[in-house]
């Protein structure tokens, strides 16, 4: 059975997002799809874990290049690390924004193996210009994905890493995307209503001495509460978190410094979670002729 490789000229282009989207679309077109991740990096291991949570025949660990083969009766969508040597198989190239010289060079190296290019994180006003740039570079535009805050959402774990924070209580949701980062208000009155104004998953930053605000964030079902200032909160906070789907993080930063430390975390978030799967499905809806793409792969 056939194999489709997803690759790019550099990391952080959105290959995992595109690989999941392609697998989802091809499965919807009637194929039995397997998602594979080549590589031995931490990112490769995290991607493979993400693949294993999807409703496809995914392999829960990275595979070696020599083992990048579909299971009997399956079509394999294989993601490579950025700048890896391409496989001898049909390929989709992923570029972030518009193409650069390195993307054009990759397209030339692939030759007839290149089925098309997917551009990610494209400002809505630049869609037509990016499509022209891809065409002029010989990169055969397959789809242009506009910016979407749901796909940029960092994981709870990304917040922890960016702040070098300690985990005071893990709500088993470190791999959950955080769509909104909120700074707790000064007063408790109306805090829960304020937190719930933002749909989707939320992380709340608040100092350790604001016990009532921490409890309000927990009761408002925040995915994470970042306790700033480096001081342990009231023991009652840990007790209240027991059994709740919230992760409590303790950061040494004061709140303004914590916000600054998280300023670029949205550019580095990993692909994980049902909300991102649904977001990319919506973005690709009607943009790709799946039957035609499957015919080209085969």
Image (cartoon, helix red, strand yellow):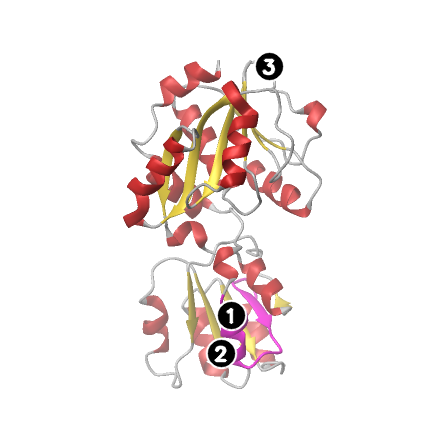
Distance from the alpha carbon under mark 1 to that under mark 3: 46 Å
Camera-nearest residue between 242 and 205: 205
Give the class, few, some or many, for how many residues have Cα within 10 Å of label 3's Cα (few <14, many ≥20).
Answer: few
Q: Is residue 26 above or below residue 173?
A: above
Camera-nearest residue between 96 and 218: 96
Would residue 54 be seen by someone viewing this image from the given angle?
no
Q: Point out residue 162 in the picture as x, y percentages from the top left corner.
A: 59, 65
| Residue at the (51%, 65%) spot, across then down | 224
Camera-nearest residue between 276 and 212: 276
Distance from the alpha carbon under mark 2 to that under mark 1: 7 Å
Residue 7: which quarter of the image? top right
Q: Which residue is mark 1?
A: 225
Distance from the alpha carbon under mark 2 to that under mark 3: 52 Å
Q: Point out residue 63 in the picture as x, y percentages from the top left corner.
A: 68, 31
Tell me if residue 286 is in the magenta stretch: no
* Residues tagged 2 and 1 counted as in contact (Cβ below 8 A): yes
Q: Point out residue 293 in the picture as x, y percentages from the top left corner.
A: 41, 20
Q: Which residue is mark 3?
A: 72
The span picked out in magenta is: 242-263
* Residues tagged 2 and 3 counted as in contact (Cβ below 8 A): no
Regarding mark 3 in the picture, which secondary structure is present there? loop
Q: Earlier in the sequence, mark 2 or mark 3?
A: 3
Q: Which residue is mark 2?
A: 206
């Amino acid at each position: 059975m056939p194999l489709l490789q997803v690759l790019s000229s550099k990391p952080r282009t959105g290959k995992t997002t595109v690989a999941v989207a392609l697998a989802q679309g091809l499965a919807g077109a009637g194929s039995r799809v397997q998602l594979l991740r080549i590589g031995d990096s931490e990112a490769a291991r995290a991607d493979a874990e993400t693949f294993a949570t999807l409703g496809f025949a995914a392999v829960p660990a990275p595979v070696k290049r020599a083992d990048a083969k579909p299971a009997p009766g399956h079509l394999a969508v294989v993601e490579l690390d950025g700048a890896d040597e391409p496989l001898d198989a049909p390929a989709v190239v992923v570029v972030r924004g518009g193409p650069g010289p390195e993307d054009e060079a990759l397209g030339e190296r692939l030759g007839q193996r290149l089925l098309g290019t997917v551009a990610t994180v494209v400002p809505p006003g630049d869609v037509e210009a990016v499509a022209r740039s891809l065409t002029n570079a010989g990169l055969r535009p397959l789809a242009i994905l506009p910016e979407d805050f749901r796909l940029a959402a960092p994981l709870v774990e990304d917040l922890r890493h960016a702040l070098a924070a300690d985990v005071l209580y893990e709500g088993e949701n470190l791999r959950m995307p955080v769509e909104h980062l909120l700074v707790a208000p000064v007063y408790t009155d109306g805090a829960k209503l304020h937190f719930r104004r933002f749909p989707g998953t939320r992380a709340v930053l608040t100092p350790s001495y604001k016990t009532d605000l921490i409890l309000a964030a927990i009761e408002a079902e925040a995915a994470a509460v970042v306790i700033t200032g480096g001081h342990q909160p009231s023991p009652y906070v840990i007790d209240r978190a027991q059994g709740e789907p919230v992760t409590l993080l303790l950061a040494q930063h004061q709140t303004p410094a914590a916000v600054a430390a998280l300023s670029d975390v949205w550019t580095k978030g990993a692909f994980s979670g049902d909300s991102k799967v649904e977001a990319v499905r919506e973005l690709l809806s009607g943009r790709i002729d799946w039957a035609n793409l499957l015919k080209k792969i085969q």
